[in-house]
């Protein structure tokens, strides 16, 4: 079953030097699976994810031949419809919880705000559901975390709180933007295990945005490789390490290897044709 269908997505920003296309003709579909999007910084990964939620504001402009979520045309949906989708049916985990959590609000207040304002839930019921969400992401002392401020949490704990916040409405689609980039390897594995279980048990669709090719190859089902706003290669995640496109091969060659050469890592030789 196709949950999301995107055809010829283009995102343009007006600048003093003229229009700049950050995403150029991107097309993909997503079922209830784990889709990875990889590429260098500036390749358009995050902009693609934010475009699905229509979070690009002026001077940015989104155009697409088709951008449909579960039968809903996202290109023509009014703002009221989009507000009903954001969080409730499509959620996005931002890259760094330090910049996504309100530093002057306790975690509990942030977790329950949507439940009370959007769903009209009582304070007691909202608190109970928030604690259940924290338990679902393997936070052992949820009552203590509810009373904490974001700066009192470790990076891994903050990221789990962000995941819990996005999962409270039980969305059909989760967009995770570099959800493990600030975490150490042990915590990273735990967060990935949580996401994997949620996709498997809840039947969600997941768009997993990352720089880490090895991680995506292990965790995702399919992979899109982006370069300068375009998809240059699409392949099964298990085949990522044997990719054919020279850009993907170049990214793989730049990865450090245990026991490999101690000399400088190779640089990526770019070809102007990749961006055409």
Image: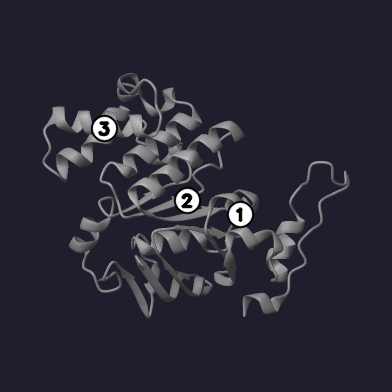
Whole-percent x, y for residue 261 in the image? 88, 47
The residue that mark 2 highlights is 177
The residue that mark 3 highlights is 130
Decide: few, some or many residues near mark 2? Use Cα within 10 Å; few <14, some 14-19, many ≥20. many
Is residue 273 depicted above or below 223 in this figure? below
Is residue 17 depicted above or below 185 in this figure? below
What is the total number of numbered labels drawn onto the structure image?
3
Whole-percent x, y for residue 148 in the image? 35, 22
How far is mark 1 from mark 3, CA to CA?
Answer: 32 Å
Q: Earlier in the sequence, mark 3 or mark 2?
A: 3
How far is mark 2 from mark 1, CA to CA?
Answer: 16 Å
The reply to whether the C-beta atoms of the residues labelled 3 and 2 are less than 8 Å apart is no
Q: Is residue 105 visible?
A: no
Residue at x 35%, y 38% (from the top left corner): 164
Residue at x 75%, y 55% (from the top left corner): 254
Whole-percent x, y for residue 183 in the image? 56, 35
**Is disc 1 placed on a helix, strand or loop?**
helix
- Among the 4 quarters of the image, the one containing residue 106: top left
Residue at x 37%, y 63% (from the top left corner): 52
**Is disc 2 placed on a helix, strand or loop?**
strand
How far is mark 3 from mark 2, CA to CA?
Answer: 22 Å
Q: Nearer the viewer, mark 1 or mark 3?
A: 1
């Amino acid at each position: 079953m196709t949950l999301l269908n995107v055809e010829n997505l283009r995102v343009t920003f007006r600048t003093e030097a003229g229009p700049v296309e950050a995403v150029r003709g991107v097309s993909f579909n997503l079922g209830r699976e784990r889709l990875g999007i990889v590429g260098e910084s500036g390749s358009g990964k995050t902009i693609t994810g934010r475009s699905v939620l229509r979070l690009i504001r002026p001077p940015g402009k989104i155009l697409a031949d088709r951008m449909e979520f579960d039968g809903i045309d996202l290109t023509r949906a009014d703002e009221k419809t989009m507000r009903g989708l954001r969080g409730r049916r499509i959620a996005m985990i931002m890259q760094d919880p330090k910049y996504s959590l309100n530093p002057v609000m306790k975690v509990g207040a942030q977790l329950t705000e949507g439940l009370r304002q959007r769903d009209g839930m009582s304070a007691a019921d909202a608190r109970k559901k928030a604690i259940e969400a924290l338990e679902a992401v393997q936070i052992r002392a949820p009552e203590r975390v509810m009373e904490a401020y974001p700066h009192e949490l470790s990076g891994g704990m903050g990221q789990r709180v962000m995941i819990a916040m996005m999962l409270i409405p039980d969305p059909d689609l989760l967009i995770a933007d570099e959800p493990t980039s600030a975490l150490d390897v042990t915590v990273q594995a735990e967060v990935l295990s949580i996401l994997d279980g949620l996709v498997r048990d809840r039947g969600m669709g997941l768009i997993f945005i990352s720089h880490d090719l090895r991680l995506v190859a292990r965790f995702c089902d399919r992979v899109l490789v982006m370069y300068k706003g375009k998809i240059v290669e699409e392949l099964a995640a298990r085949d990522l390490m044997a990719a054919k496109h020279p850009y993907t091969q170049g990214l793989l060659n730049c990865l450090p290897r245990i026991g490999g050469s101690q000399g400088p890592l190779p640089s990526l030789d770019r070809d102007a044709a990749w961006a055409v």
